[in-house]
Image (cartoon, rainbow, N blue to C red):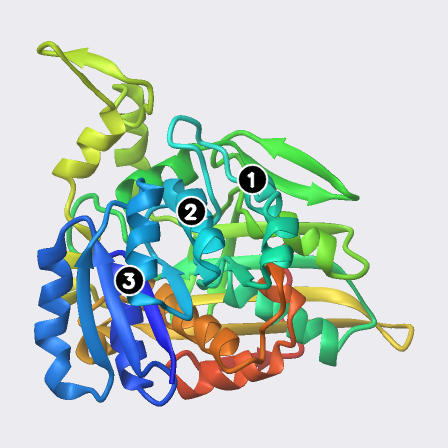
Amino acid sequence: MSRALIIGAGGVAGVVIHKCCQNSEVFTDICIASRTKAKCDKFKEELQSKTKTNITTAQVDADNVQELVALMKEYKPDICINVALPYQDLHIMDACLECKVDYLDTANYEPEDTAKFEYSWQWAYRERFEKAGITAILGSGFDPGVTGVFCAYAQKHYFDEINYIDILDCNGGDHGYPFATNFNPEINIREVSAKGSYIQDGKWVETEPMEIKRVYNFDQVGEKDMYLLHHEELESLALNIRGIKRIRFFMTFGQSYLTHLKCLENVGMTSIEPIMYEGKEIVPLQFLKAVLPDPASLGPRTKGKTNIGCIFQGKKDGKDKTYYVYNVCDHQECYKEVGSQAISYTTGVPAMIGAMMVLTGKWKRPGVYNVEEFDPDPFMEALNKWGLPWTENFDPVLVP
């Protein structure tokens, strides 16, 4: 028996909740907690009659450590699955430390007032989690998350050293809106409007936003434009994968999305600097988030597929070797199963699997870890079982 506290009630949280309820042998009890309890209650009403998992709900402000502590002391969870906002990661980790509860999230901490993505703040918790005897798993979504597991799997089974990694994230879906984001608009726009970067010979190389473009033909999606972005898993993979000379992250964007984004940037709507409006201080990007379509509403109207994976170049037994492992996910199939589009699905399923790895003891070790630091095999098996099957290609087209 295990008890999981799920913090968050957005699109990704919805997938996590559905998947935990499908896996009631591991998740015998879950508590869904959010600032808006009505959203949590809606999930309970929808699912309680369809699962053996016992569902409770609670109201909590994830910015308030003492509220989180009080909830954890009352509910006594074995693990806390954080699918709230990245700004709230440290508050939730603080509460887990005080209550000695294992922790898992899908995205690294970032300050609310600075578009900066790095693990330093959370890695600083390592010694405290070790002393408390509890486990923290960072970035158990898809990217970061599954991409890190793919890297660990490639390293374990196919390479003596991996010299080059290209992570390719392709969303071939169409939601029909002129402009919308497939996950939290505030996080999404901060991510894609920031400067790009990649790791070369142990050093960060910075690029202008969308400066480096490549074209790639994705299985079951087709040819797409993709752009080099900064992404947090590069930082941990460069430390944990043997032989790295270069690691890059690419994401696909259509021209319509880029044109709208550039226009919004030009008029200041993507800024995170507060401004005064009619006597009140507002953040333009937060206002933009409020007027854009809610990503959780995109599920019924999104068609097409995603293709996310990693291309590796390295050596095995002294010989050059290439390997590509990826997942293809269908937006409409995801909606039929859990009521979400594939972006939320590909993040939520790995969060459930990561929590299952901890609760079943397969990834249980005191301290703070990234996913590639654990045995990838049970996670890879679970991906096939729980809705994210993967495909291997041993002669892939490489990215120039």
Dot placed on the residue nearer the N-terminal end, 1 or 2: 2
Q: Amino acid at mark 2?
A: Asp
Which x, y percent locates residue 323?
67, 73
Q: Which residue is mark 3?
A: 74
Between the C-alphas of marks 3 and 1, the distance is 28 Å
Residue to which mark 2 is pinned = 89
Q: Which residue appears at 83% of the width and 72% of the height?
A: 160
- Is residue 360 visible in this depiction of the protein? yes
Most foreground residue, 295 or 353: 353
> Looking at numbered disc 3 in the image, what kind of residue is underneath it?
Glu
Residue 24 vs 220, above or below: the answer is below
- Precedes in sequence: disc 3 or disc 1: 3
Disc 1 to disc 2, how far (Cα)? 10 Å
- First-in-chain label (3 vs 2): 3
Give the side of residue 42 with respect to residue 101, left or right. Answer: left
Q: Which residue is mark 1?
A: 121
> Which residue is painted at 67% across and 51% down in the image?
247
Q: Are marks 1 and 2 in contact (CB under 8 Å)?
A: yes
